[in-house]
Image: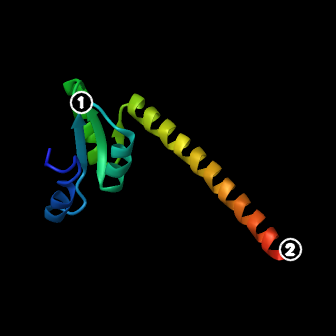
Amino acid sequence: MPEGGELEILPKICAKSPGPKVLILSAFFKDDLIVEASQRSVKGYLPKTLMPGGVVKATRATYAGELWAERKVLTQTLESLLRNVHGLHGLLSRIFNKLKVNRIVDHTA
């Protein structure tokens, strides 16, 4: 892994080979890393514990243009994204309501 971040090498890979189908092999996955990696051309997420047959399956799937990750990793990431969306929705609702209240106060003055 290059110093400075797990995904630092991706621009160099993409510069040498446009449209690569990159697989990440890792001992653990962080939700934010998976989201950022997906935005940077990564097509698969493999745990280091994956058996050889799983590596072959993941490689074939990504070569065919599919996204590949274990169900557990996808579930964890989607649940995290949903929590973030709900949090943002609540924040935006509070901001909108505050703006509405301020607007009403401005009109009554």
Compute the Cα span from label 1 to label 2: 60 Å
Left/right of residue 97 with respect to residue 2 in the rendered view:
right
The residue sitting at the front extreme is: 109
Asked which secondary structure carries label 1, the reply is: loop
Q: Amino acid at mark 1?
A: Ala
Residue 52 lies, with reference to residue 39, above or below; the image says: above
> Would you name the residue on which mark 2 appears?
108
Question: Residue at 41% across / 30% down in the picture?
Answer: 71
Question: Residue at 23% across / 34% down in the picture?
Answer: 26
Choose mark 1 or mark 2, whichever is in front: 2
Q: Amino acid at mark 2?
A: Thr
Residue 65 lies, with reference to residue 95, above or below; the image says: above
Residue 67 image point, x, y percent: 36, 44
Question: Residue at 51% across / 36% down in the picture?
Answer: 79
In-front residue for pair 23/84: 84
> Would you name the residue on which mark 1 appears?
27
Left/right of residue 23 with respect to residue 92 in the rendered view:
left
Residue 87 image point, x, y percent: 58, 46
Residue 92 image point, x, y percent: 63, 56
Left/right of residue 35 with respect to residue 101 in the rendered view:
left
In-front residue for pair 94/17: 94
